[in-house]
Amino acid sequence: MFTLETLRDFLSAALSSIETNVDSLNALDSVIGDGDHGTAILTAMRAATNAAETTNGSLTEILAAVGWAVMSEAGGSTSSLTGSFYVGMSESAPSDALSPDETIAMFESGLQNVRFSTKAAVGDKTLMDALIPAIGAMTALKGTGATLPTIFAAAAAAAREGAESTKNRVAKFGRAKNLGERTVGHYDAGARSTAMIYEAFAETSGRRS
């Protein structure tokens, strides 16, 4: 079951991964972006983790608090999209102990809310190259009886593959868009950090099983 403790463990693990990789993410972003993605996603995940640890209430209420904390305590598109994801999740958490299929639906709701904030899709060399495949891999397991570790392992693998694919893409959003074909051959930092987060979710889910 996906519970509040699951959420807290997931966010803590994701934060730890981003803390470890913040410099490499900044370096990656400096090639075709502003050079601050690592710092931005670190700020976002710290806000998310703090809100999850300090807010009382239902899973729905805490997810909403996480999303709004990210959007209010950090700036830029990274925080806007990350916060939108958790707010979207909060809109599809029917109880405080979710079945695997309910967990998938909750993550689908998160992605749906992000789509209201960006038109970026797979192939545009953004975090969506990792996020959309991750949620798609989860959706493919709905109704199969898959366990949470299996679901998040699939999500992590899809996110990692999506992040890798950005190396051969031309950027269509953000500052990198101005570089056109020169962005080919470089990874998108947002997709890479998204993959790191889902890898942390998967590792944590495996330990909890």
Image (cartoon, rainbow, N blue to C red):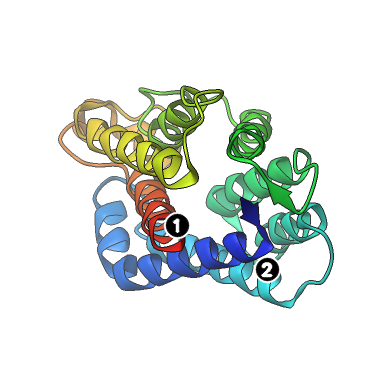
Left or right placement of residue 81 versus residue 69 in this view: left
> Which SS class for mark 1?
loop
Q: Residue at x 73, y 77 (%)?
A: 54
Residue 70 picture location, percent across and down: 65, 60
Query: What label does residue 189 carry, if any?
Result: none
- Which quarter of the rendering shows the C terminus? bottom left
Q: Which type of secondary structure does the marked residue at label 2 adopt? A: helix
- 170 vs 201, nearest the viewer: 201
Mark 2: give few (<14), some (14-19) or many (20+) Cα within 10 Å.
Answer: many
Residue under the point 34% across and 30% down: 171
Q: Position of residue 85 (x, y in %)?
A: 63, 44
- For this rendering, which residue is in front, 113 or 99? 99
Outermost bottom residue:
54
Which one is closest to the eye, mark 2 or mark 1? Answer: 1
Which numbered disc flags the more N-terminal residue, 2 or 1? 2
Residue in the picture at 76% in, 54% down: 96
Label 2 belongs to which residue? Answer: 52
Q: x and y percent of residue 196 in the render?
A: 35, 54
The image quadrant that residue 133 belongs to is top left
Q: Amino acid at mark 1?
A: Ser
Q: Residues within 10 Å of mark 1 (few under 14, many from 20)?
A: few
Name the residue carrying label 1.
209
* Disc 2 from disc 1: Cα separation: 21 Å
Give yes or no for contact between labels 2 and 1 (Cβ–Cβ under 8 Å).
Answer: no
- The three-letter code of the residue at mark 2 reads Ala
